[in-house]
Amino acid sequence: MLHLLLTTLLPIILLITLGTFLRLRGFLAESFWPGAERLSYYVLLPSLFLHGLATANLDGVPVMGMVGVLMLSTLAGAVLLVLYQGAINHDGADFTSVFQGGIRFNNYTGASLAAGLYGSAGIALAAVANAAIVPLVNLLCVLVFARFSARHSSPAAVLRAIFANPLIVGCAGGLLLRVTGLGLPPGIEPTVKALGQAALPMGLLCVGAALGGASLGQQVRPLMAASAFKFLIMPLTTWGLCRVLGLSGQAAVVAVLFQALPTASSSYVMARQMGGNAPLMATIIALQTVAAAATLPLVLMLTLG
């Protein structure tokens, strides 16, 4: 089991480390990384999930059970975070970063670990996890920004941001192709597959590069709050719901895994665009990504054991 964890995590750690090294050494121009992140977010990762859902054999996979567990755990985490804010009363912009740090997750790392653990079935389960919680997480984050940040978006802008999310579009497209039985045409399928295969290494390099430009700040309380929710409350809540709702096996492992992932680097972009505390968000991303090297093996050993 330990060997499996190490062989699954080592390529992720090495790719993240390489991204950090390339950023710090200035091997690539600074202008490369925003473009790479945009390519990953808008093209490569949606292709990965579209292909995974459109072509995967999900027979026997408890899709509805997995969706139910993930949505309920996400909602429970969001409610607990809002109650925590009511008790502690962080600055509004600070709380938006705590909230994102508590419920957002790094798609790249999750898909990599799921694929390393279960191969093509892991990619399919990761795609289901994204289809279940990416729309909900985005909706909750947008609502929290509208309530707690200094900047407010119009309802129309909020709806556009939700329904134009490329990960949502990719997952919805894959589900639609599978449900209708249309599938991907012979000439298109290998193209989408190749784009999806490029998503994980490119995305992990970008995560590492983001760490190379981040610095730890002094805001210890929001940092610890976000990480406590991310690494303790969210996975424990998900594990408990798996037991209550009878979700087990690979689906349960991937469900708990996704709720224990460090927060996504895209959180920083959202914080910048919607009036959050972007420096705090960058620090949370850096801290959680480094800490995940220790926390994820523990989570996987507990769930797999």
Image (cartoon, rainbow, N blue to C red):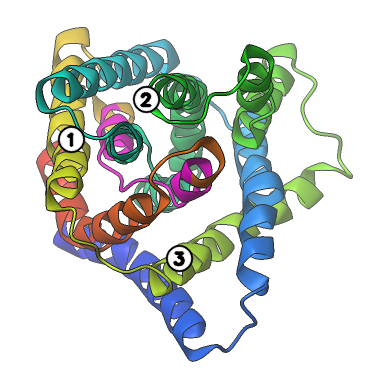
Rendered residue at 13%/53% (across/down) = 220
In this rendering, the answer to whether 293 lies above or below 196 is: below
For the record, the magenta segment spans: 252-271
Does the stretch in magenta take in 240?
A: no
SS for callout 3:
helix
Mark 1 and mark 2: span between their CA atoms? Answer: 19 Å
Q: Earlier in the sequence, mark 1 or mark 2?
A: 2
Residue 229: image tag: 1
At label 2, the amino acid type is Phe
In this rendering, the answer to whether 114 lies above or below 241 is: below
Q: Earlier in the sequence, mark 1 or mark 3?
A: 3
- Describe residue 203's horizontal placement relative to residue 11 as left or right: right
SS for callout 2:
helix
SS for callout 1:
helix
At label 3, the amino acid type is Ala
Magenta stretch mostly in which secondary structure?
helix
Q: Callout 1: few (<14), some (14-19), or many (20+) C-alpha neighbours within 10 Å?
A: many
Residue 292: image tag: none
Residue 148: image tag: 2
Mark 2 and mark 3: span between their CA atoms? Answer: 26 Å
Residue 210: image tag: 3
